Image: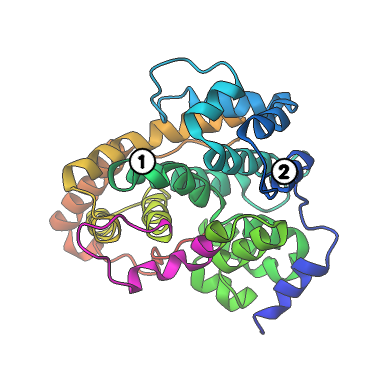
Amino acid sequence: MSSGSIIDRFRATERLPSLPSVAVEVLSLTEQPDCTIEQLAGVIQNDPALTARILKVINSPLFGVAKHITSIKQASTLLGMRKLRIMALSFSIVHSVSPREERGAFNYDRYWRQALTAAVAARLLAMHTARSLTEDAFVGGLLHNIGLVAGNLTAPDLFAPLLALQAQRGAWSVDDEIEALGVSHAELSAELLDVWGLPESLTDAVRGYRGAEASERTPGAEPTLSRLICAGVAIAELFSGDAAVVDIERCRTRCVALTGIRAESLEMVLDAVATRVQEIANMLAIQIGEPMNYERLVARAREQLSVAIASPEKSEQPGRRRRGRAA
């Protein structure tokens, strides 16, 4: 299958999720060289639902602001124009692709749990390693797999084998995506963000996050946005299923290599992820099922290891395809 087949449908179909009107206004306004943050705040506060979502998230423990923020004007002072712009875009986009009525075979709960976990994890990692990228990391994690929703809507025939795998074993892998679609979810997502006209820096980071480990990180340098997204997705994959002790250690190693985060700080991030994910899901009214708690995940992995040591003949578990789990 050529990589252009589903991409062509993206650009030709009328079923592609459209950019919400407030997002269009935000993009149009901020492209003007004389745009002010007051004007941006004015556009956002004209959408009460979006305003409420942004304020809820800013006042959540994820941001840890000392003073309660009650208006978009206050939020704009805290965030600055670029961060406020990208947050408004991401939250309006989330609700443009959330299911309203018929959910079909696509597992939206799993999809949003994966996306929110990657977003929260990427932001927490950035807080320890690249504070200037904290909001971008959140948005990049949130949108890294948004192409899956659009792809399922625009090419249900191509997505049928993936949904069959989801029904059979609970998830599909990135390799399965490439086999069925010709492209990965990262490429699909970047294509959608490009069609929507989102910032090139964000689009490029989403498109390239899966190859972030291929480039060597300069010791002591801040990680790039693509590295933060990659590490956030690695944590989301860890929390997505039945992790073994080796999976936990592999994830820790990847996160340190990608971001340079200290081991003790990484443990703090992993401990906080599940709580923060549930908080954000509640604020955005997104159904995600029950996120995995890190303490429980580790306990289960150790228990499985103990059982495997006690019963070596039962330790083999064929058919596990963990790396690169997508949905």
Callout 1 secondary element: helix
Q: Position of residue 241 (x, y in %)?
A: 40, 50
Say which residue appears at 39% left-offset and 63% top-offset. Answer: 322
Q: Is residue 75 above or below residue 217?
A: above
On screen, residue 302 versus residue 279, left or right, reads left
Please check the rendered image and state whether residue 245 is part of the magenta-colored stretch, yes or no: no
- Give whichever of 284, 237 is nearer the camera: 284
Which amino acid type is shown beneath numbered disc 2?
A: Leu
Say which residue appears at 54% left-offset and 72% top-offset. Answer: 176
- Find the magenta span and give its range: 204-225
Mark 2 lies on residue: 29
- Most extreme residue toward the front is 34
Q: Does residue 327 show up?
A: no
Task: Select label 1 or label 2 by which is in front.
Answer: 2
Q: Which quarter shows the C terminus?
A: bottom right
Which amino acid type is shown beneath numbered disc 1?
A: Leu
Say which residue appears at 75% left-offset and 58% top-offset. Answer: 153
Mark 1 lies on residue: 124
